[in-house]
Image (spheres, rainbow, N blue to C red):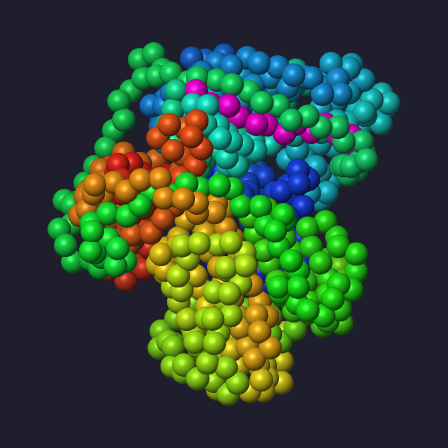
Amino acid sequence: MDDKRQVQEALNRALSGLRENPLLAQRIIAETKGEKKTMRTSCRIKGWIIALALILAMTGTAYAAFSSQVAEFFGRHWGGDMEEWLREGKVVQVGESVTVADVSFTLDEVIYRNRGLYGVGTVRALNENDILVPEEYVEDLDFFAMNEDAQALARQARETGKRLICPEVRFSQVSVDGGSMMTIGCVGYYDVRNEDGSVTFSFEAEDGYALEEGETYQAVLHLYVQQVNDQGLIQHDSRQTLEWTVAFAPTVMPDAPQATEKAGQEPVQQGGYEIVAGAVYQETGTMPVYKATETVFTDRVDPAWFNQTGIAEEPYAGGFVFNDHARLDMGAQALYYQEYTDELYDYNTRERTHGNPDVKPNLMPKPALSYAIASMAGDIHFGYDYVKGLDISLEKTELSHLSLAQAQEQAEALLEKLGLKGYACAYALDMSLERIQSLAAPCCAFWYEGDWPASNGPRPDYSQATDADEGYYLFYTLEGIDDLSDGRHQISLFINARGIVSANIVNWYDRGEALYTPDSLITPQKAVERLYEEIAHARYGDTVRRVQRVALTYSAVRADNKADGMVLVPVWQVAYLEGEHDGDDYCGWAEFNAVNGALIDAIFQ
């Protein structure tokens, strides 16, 4: 249902400036307040969400009773390999039901497998005047208009006077063995309508941080019931909701097959990779474990830390608009600050000129030049295609009106105000006037030219830049390790002579007191061995062509005693080239708890 490479690309794009939609941050913040997600597959990063579209053109049918309903359902829709893989997991037949607005929701069965929960359930209308419509039918009005089953239901509603009802199930949070609730990172959904009029819903929740193996689980599901008109349009004012917490304890399936290793995996690589670790580890061979508490920026952030021009409008849900048109969007664990002009642009212009002339205008504030320069710097850092092959590195520690030391001083003063500990600068880049102008043409060609350019936004005029627009792009991570991160502790800032003009700050957990220091950590060599062990029976059969780097940083995980909450533990992040042929530069990654060697998360899960 989901591809972690798409997730990582989306994450990189988000942190490089949220180019696609300057108001995306507002929608992200709204999602954290329980509003409806509009994509069938989503990746939720605590306090913000990156939504990814997945088109599933499949016709649903009822499934027969079987020893594992989940394995059979997923196998039917995603292939026999998926079914066999799920049969190696732990299963529980739940059977618990709740009712929302005369609609019954039953969670039938759940399988746990490799830091993922996979479930199916049944939705039934208790009112004979209601007709259930799967969400797939109503996500796209064009699809609703062309789909024969959807049109048959619409005709039935018109002829009988019955109501079309769309039920939705959203997997939100999970607790393991009585530990704290954590929001799930990646969740996919697929629903089908059955011949008896019921709807089968399914979910695939994957999250290495939140879904470690345990004996008992509590899942929070958000349920929605809403009416749909005969054109397929959801009537949002009819929505009724319920937050449903379900407890279950999966066990090994009867006669479950043994997990099989992938054939042909090469021997463990011995050396030849970079080892990156800070001074504390180099001196002592260990690092402390810290208490971790959930970040709540909304309780402690002063907007004047970002902009002193004053608030131009009443604060909207999750953010502020300043007198100079800059915006600060804020959720519990994420902050986005960008500068805009007083002009508006139509975000739907591209769609209107490429086959949909009737689409309505969607007016948005035009990003300022500082926004465009900061986004270009993010492109460089994350290695977008138009900069690949170019030797772009830090050249100048002194610009016309600002030094690198002054920029870092401002950045770290902000981090101190925000209460963010443990961060170090992982990457710095000078955006001189010469660099801005030399990259303007390839940048614009990549984002704004061609039959279907990458961005809907207005093309920046980099020729208007002056030496006053020069600045430094700074990227901060825990322990200052670049390239690899869990995505939950990353900060990118752009600072020019006027101060911090662009900020993308994601921090799930604050670092608290040191709880203890292990006598030793597993070695980087052991982390590489663990990579080969885990990949041998992974769901996605990567091949490790070459391990590139093993880096030591921190990640938030549940404490050993899960009732004790969360801790920040040292983590070995292993980066490797995958695939069998030289020239393919696909980079895989896996993260291992450096205290006990447990796999936390990996791209192949």
- Residue 567 visible in image: yes
Residue 514: quarter of image: top left
Per the rendered image, the range of residues in magenta is 216-228
Please say if 449 is above or below 352: below
- Tell me residue 578's x, y (percent): 28, 51
At horizontal 40% and vertical 64% (from top left) the residue drawn is: 425
Please say if 22 is above or below 540: below
- Tell me residue 414's x, y (percent): 53, 63
Lateral position of residue 497 relative to residue 225, left or right:
left
Q: How many marks?
A: 0
| Viewer-closest of 123 and 356 | 123
- Tell me residue 598's x, y (percent): 29, 36
Residue 66: quarter of image: top left
Q: Main secondary structure of the magenta part?
A: strand
Q: Where, quadrant-wise, is the C terminus in this rendering?
A: top left
Lateral position of residue 293 relative to residue 526, left or right:
right
| Viewer-closest of 509 and 432 | 509
At horizontal 57% and vertical 27% (from top left) the residue drawn is: 220
At horizontal 40% and vertical 34% (from top left) the residue drawn is: 558
Lateral position of residue 395 relative to residue 9, left or right:
left
- Tell me residue 138's x, y (percent): 70, 37
Look at the image and say whether residue 219 sits in the magenta stretch: yes
At horizontal 81% and vertical 25% (from top left) the residue drawn is: 163
Residue 583: quarter of image: bottom left
Lateral position of residue 46 relative to residue 254, left or right:
right
Look at the image and say whether residue 439 sits in the magenta stretch: no
Please say if 496 is above or below 433: above
